[in-house]
Amino acid sequence: MLSTLSALALEVHHLGPAADWYETHLGLDGDRSEHEARYQVGETTLVLREPSTVPRGGLHVHYALATPEDRYDDWFAHLQENFDPVEFDFGSARSLYVDDPDGHCVEIGTGGSDGDDPLTGVFEVALEVEDLARAEAFYGDLGFEVVDRGDGRERTRLSGPMALELWEPQRGIADARGAVHADLRFATPDPEAAAEAVAERACRVDTVGSGDGTGGEPHRVRDPDGHYLTFHAE
């Protein structure tokens, strides 16, 4: 139902220092406006947003950026010059974790497609939820599928346009926390159908932007945990 994660927004206290961090340490190149900076990472636009609009960007978001296998050691050496990255070996993949100035836990993990780009996309986002079963049902209606559950059902991992981690309040690897009031944007063949799929479970459903009335208009829903999802046509 959902094709790609087209945007992930992070809330930052002050845009200047936050954007400087991402441009200096992650090498991202994008555009800044008065309250936002936008960077393209593979198919996903990473948005840094000062408190200025609703939906706001997410707080203490843990998310993962993919890098090709042959780039990983370079990333570790580069970030070790200024930070103390936490490293974790999953067996089939390796990841490092660093915190940005606003408390977002940035993971860089192997598995990115080969090519010239050192970062190839966003492959995981973690959301904090109050009730795992309720959140699983909501995202299941959007086509996400459960692939793993933690001990005691404190967390669930789902597959979809990217890996989606649903966490009850907790600290994970590198003290990462699930996002609060996250703002996610997805491309889909039918935005109206995506919104209708979760309308009964959602706290709110809105049509945003302009359209021709054919169902191609962007639709935004607010899930039971206060996360915003916007669906737009591919």
Image (cartoon, rainbow, N blue to C red):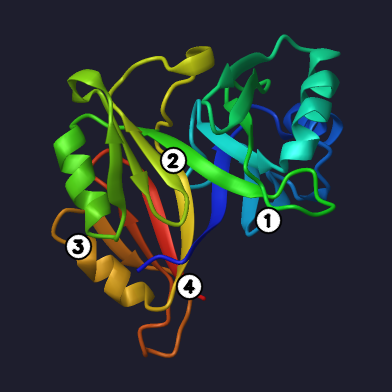
Q: Amino acid at mark 4?
A: Gly
Q: Nearer the viewer, mark 4 or mark 2?
A: 2
Q: Nearer the viewer, residue 64 or 70?
A: 70
Mark drawn on residue 182: 2
Q: Is residue 64 visible?
A: yes
**Badge 2 or badge 1: first in the primary sequence:** 1
Q: Residues within 10 Å of mark 3 (few under 14, many from 20)?
A: some
The numbered mark, 4 or 2, whose residue comes first in the sequence reads 2
**Distance from the alpha carbon under mark 4 to that under mark 3:** 19 Å
Relative to 95, 76 lies left or right: right
Measuring from the top left, give residue 165's x and y in whole percent: 38, 36
Mark before the other along the chain sequence, 1 or 4: 1
Question: Residue drawn 27% across and 61% down?
Answer: 205
Give the residue type at disc 3.
Ala
Question: What residue is rendered at 32% in x and 57% in y?
Answer: 221
Q: Is residue 138 above or below residue 209?
A: above
Q: Considering only order in the chain, which callout, 1 or 3, is on the residue closer to the N terminus? A: 1
Q: Are marks 1 and 4 in contact (CB under 8 Å)?
A: no
- The quarter of the displayed image where residue 169 is located: top left
**Disc 1/disc 4 C-alpha distance (Å):** 25 Å
Residue with the mark numbered 4: 209
Mark 3–mark 1 CB contact (< 8 Å)? no
- The label on residue 42 is 1
User: What amino acid does circle 2 point to?
Assistant: Ala
Q: Quadrant of residue 155?
A: top left
